[in-house]
Image (cartoon, coloured by chain):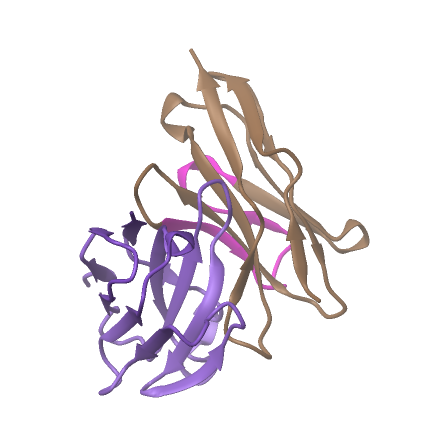
Chain colours: A brown, B purple
Amino acid sequence: AQSVTQLGSHVSVSEGALVLLRCNYSSSVPPYLFWYVQYPNQGLQLLLKYTSAATLVKGINGFEAEFKKSETSFHLTKPSAHMSDAAEYFCAVYYNQGGKLIFGQGTELSVKP
Amino acid sequence: DTGVSQDPRHKITKRGQNVTFRCDPISEHNRLYWYRQTLGQGPEFLTYFQNEAQLEKSRLLSDRFSAERPKGSFSTLEIQRTEQGDSAMYLCASSLSQGRASGRLGEQYFGPGTRLTVT
């Protein structure tokens, strides 16, 4: 069965520090991969997606993610954290055979001043 | 273009009551999805529609749950005889199907959710 694993349910960084949120997927076929962000009491907002066009994907708010097939990973990074980045981040996979997104359990990012 | 909207945003109900939620997708999107999210977890897929056809249902969707999209536009999700375990955030999302999506295949756009509390 397809699955997504996000390592670390909570990540805390200082403002201005590097953000690294980890995501690994299980797949026998190339998936489409997504990162979403969720602010408290809100829905999910699409940050970026990988669809095989390029392994390094740039998204909104300065985030980017790199697809590594050999490691089945799609980690999210941002060079310099901002207080407004504090939120819950979800990695998800989409398979064209079905319609649904399969989400990881999420990583809560805290940013310390 | 307006985003996905959901109504109500919050619902408190007593155990055993029926509740109904509404989702209005982005107007040109022909796919509509329902997910459930409990505290500290990622969203879990419940069901999805392409136009008015319900194409897939999760085993999470018990007999007490029913979803409809009668005219291929808005959708409703009904929970009958609510249980405390039904307390969760119910998220709706919409997208374009494969034939229409072009470079946006797989992109789902989420509404703000309906938070259900069963007391």
Q: Is residue B34 left or right of residue A69?
A: left
Residue A38's quadrant in the figure? top left
Residue B79 in the image, given as x and y percentages of width and height: 31, 68
Residue placed furthest toward the top: A113
Closest to the observer, B40 or B60: B60
Q: Where is residue A49 in the image (x, y as percent from the top left)?
A: 52, 56
In the depicted structure, whether residue A8 falls above or below residue A75: above
x 22%, y 73%: residue: B27
In the shown orientation, is residue B114 left or right of residue A13? left
Q: Where is residue B93 in the image (x, y as percent from the top left)?
A: 35, 64
How many marks do you count on the picture?
Answer: 0
Q: Is residue B3 above or below residue B48?
A: above
Look at the image and say whether residue A97 sits in the magenta stretch. Answer: no
Left or right of A81 on screen, residue B111? left
Q: Hey, which quadrant is residue A11 in on the image?
A: top right
A38 or A61, nearer to the observer: A38
Report the residue that reaches farthest toward the front.
B16
The residue shown at (60%, 71%) is A95
Residue at the image point whose x is 25% and y is 73% from the top: B76
Could you tell me which quadrant the N terminus of chain B lies in?
Answer: bottom left
Residue A40 placement, left or right of A59: left
As displayed, is residue A77 above or below residue B114? Answer: above
x then y, percent, for residue B82 = 33, 61
Which residue is at the front of the view, B86 or A90? B86
Task: Tell me which segment is drawn in magenta.
Answer: A44-63
